[in-house]
Amino acid sequence: MKKHLNTLFVTTQGAYLAKEGETVTVKVDGTVKLQIPVHTLDGIVCFGQVSCSPYLMGFCAEKDVTISFLTEYGRFLARVQGPVSGNVLLRREQYRRADDRESSAAVARSVLAGKISNSRTLLQRALRDHGEKIETNDLQSVVDRLNAILMHVQNERELDRLRGYEGEAANLYFSVFDHLITAQKDSFYFRQRNRRPPLDRVNCLLSFIYTLVMHDIRSALECTGLDPAVGFLHRDRPGRPGLALDLMEEFRPYIADRMTLTLINLMQVKDKGFEIKSSGAVLMDDETRKKVLVAYQKRKQDEITHPFLKEKMPLGLLFYTQALMFARYLRGDLEGYPAFIWR
């Protein structure tokens, strides 16, 4: 469990939260592990088998401290919230800014700078760590071009042009993605990005992990009181979680793409774990899906130092931290949204 940015995250399975005076106590196996004054909290997020006393839920609702319940895998389940909340003001500000092209471009600029920077870092690390196994000239050429695009993005004010730079950067990045696969190349190869359905094993893995990340970010936005459907780079479309997709951009290379490459290159997934349908669609079997889920949960437990806050935290809390910082940006506490930049 960790208290961060006035939000208490409880990830210890079997933990029990209760009210004791004006404090929240967290017990595990009957032993008090943490005790926090409720007036210091904005929210409590419970993952998996974490339970709360009714008295605590009522007390937190009275004090405007939201309690959210998520599955162990980060899927949003429910929220206990008092009758009066500042969230409506936050959402109204979100809607106002999303309707403004200049404000939308400012957010798009940040998330795309994060995405392109993190894509470049992934390629640079491949050059550093596996230079003897891969086509270094091709990768270095793409790294150089991504540097140039990143400079254009940071100075661009038009939303449509930003989307153009995003498309160019994505095409360049994926043009050398196959070079990053260093094992099982007969079975795992990447020609181009495809989905719905994925037509090869690599795209199958990418799509599945992107879905996991997107659900986690959507849960984080729900917990923060933001509307996951109203995006800035991704505009309104029925059924599309625009803001979740916006904030997901910075995490694609850092979490999903890296994890896909690790699973393949360390042979943690095998070709026989995927089924190729007569239509050409590729599906992973239950055993492989379980391996990927376990690997994803382990990955989220890795500890990192947040590059903006300079604080250590489990990787899984990055989604919530970024959502909280986005809310702070909308409230005017931050001049700009600081996307996650992989160092």
Image: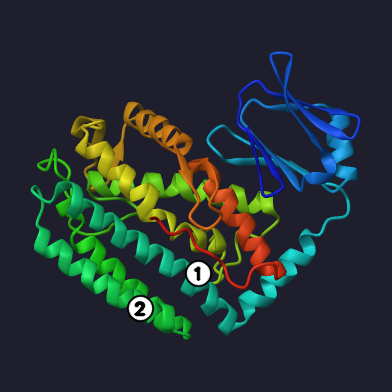
Query: Measured along the vertical axis of the image, is residue 272 above or below residue 173?
Result: above
Determine whether the residue tagged by mark 1 lies in a helix, strand or loop: loop
Residue 58, numbered circle: none
- Taking the image as shown, residue 192 lies to the left or right of residue 153, namely left
Element marked by disc 2: helix
Question: Is residue 324 shown above or below 238?
Answer: above
Res 332 visible: yes
- Residue drawn at 27 percent across, 37 percent down: 263
Q: Residue at x 70, y 71 (%)?
A: 332
- Residue 51 percent location from the top left of the image: 73, 26
- Residue 202 location, x and y as percent? 25, 46
Looking at the picture, which amino acid does disc 2 mark?
Met
Does residue 64 lie above or below 57 as drawn? below
Quadrant in which the N terminus is drawn: top right
According to the image, label 2 marks what residue?
A: 151
Query: Does residue 239 appear in this view?
Result: no
Mark 1 is on which residue type?
His
Residue beneath disc 1: 234
